[in-house]
Image (spheres, rainbow, N blue to C red):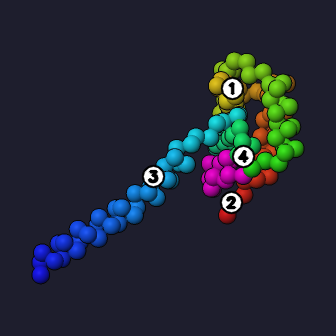
Amino acid sequence: MRIWRIALALLVSTLLSATMAPTAALASPTASVAKKVLVELREQGGFAGFDNRVIVYTNGCVRLSRRTGPTVDKCLTSAEKRKLHGELKRLHLGRSEAQPQGADFLKYTLTYKGHRVSRYTLTRTWTPVVKRLERFLVKYWAPD
């Protein structure tokens, strides 16, 4: 009787592993496809302790997160993508800015075309991009 139970357990485990293997093999290629980042904004600091993040992918979708609450994934409209691309064409990242003295400063970090730059004051070319990305955060991020 004991051998029968062992044989049955071995048969069941073999059948389960055989049926699970194709599913795992099919799921892995999809999971390994990486999204390519177009632009990323991170706002940190201030007395309120901001930690906002907006990531726009090349496929036109965004990932939005704040210090508290969920991470939200949405896709932009065609008009939003077009306006953002126009502002990114005029963006000049420049160099990172030194942290000013004091405690109530927002640090803006933009990542674009492989370059990451942090600033505490927005330049003429940064302002439209940062404001547009902040609008996406306000429009699409909502806690459940």
Q: Point out the residue furthest to the left here.
A: 2
Instruction: Locate residue 42, reporting x and y percent.
Output: 67, 37
- Depth check: 22 or 72 in front? 22
The amino acid sitting under disc 3 is Ala
- Residue at image position (68%, 52%) is 73
- Closer to the chain start, of discs 1 and 2, is 1
Q: Please tell me in which quadrant of the rendered image residue 102 appears.
A: top right
Q: Earlier in the sequence, mark 1 or mark 3?
A: 3
x 70%, y 28%: residue: 112
Find residue 18 and name its label: none
Query: Circle 3 sits in a helix, a strand or a loop, which is it?
Result: helix
State how far apart marks 2 and 3 are (Cα): 35 Å
**Percent position (x, y) of residue 121?**
76, 27
Query: Looking at the picture, does residue 62 appear above or below residue 10?
Result: above
Q: Residues within 10 Å of mark 1 (few under 14, many from 20)?
A: few
Question: In the rendered structure, which segment of residues is drawn in magenta?
Answer: 63-74
- Callout 2: 10 Å neighbours few (<14), some, many (20+)? few
Eyeballing the image, is 11 above or below 18?
below
Picture quarter containing residue 87?
Answer: top right
The kind of residue tagged 1 is: Lys
Contact between marks 4 and 2 (CB within 8 A): the answer is no
The residue where tag 3 is placed is 25
Task: Pick whichever of labels 1 and 4 is earlier in the sequence.
Answer: 4
The answer to whether the residues at label 3 and label 4 have Cβ atoms under 8 Å apart is: no
Q: Is residue 65 visible?
A: yes
* Amino acid under disc 2: Pro
Mark 1, residue position: 113
> Marks 1 and 3, how far apart in space?
33 Å
Could you say whether the residue bearing mark 4 is in a helix, strand or loop?
Answer: strand
How far apart are the two marked residues, 1 and 4, measured between alpha carbons?
Answer: 17 Å
Name the residue tied to disc 2. Answer: 143
Residue beneath disc 4: 61
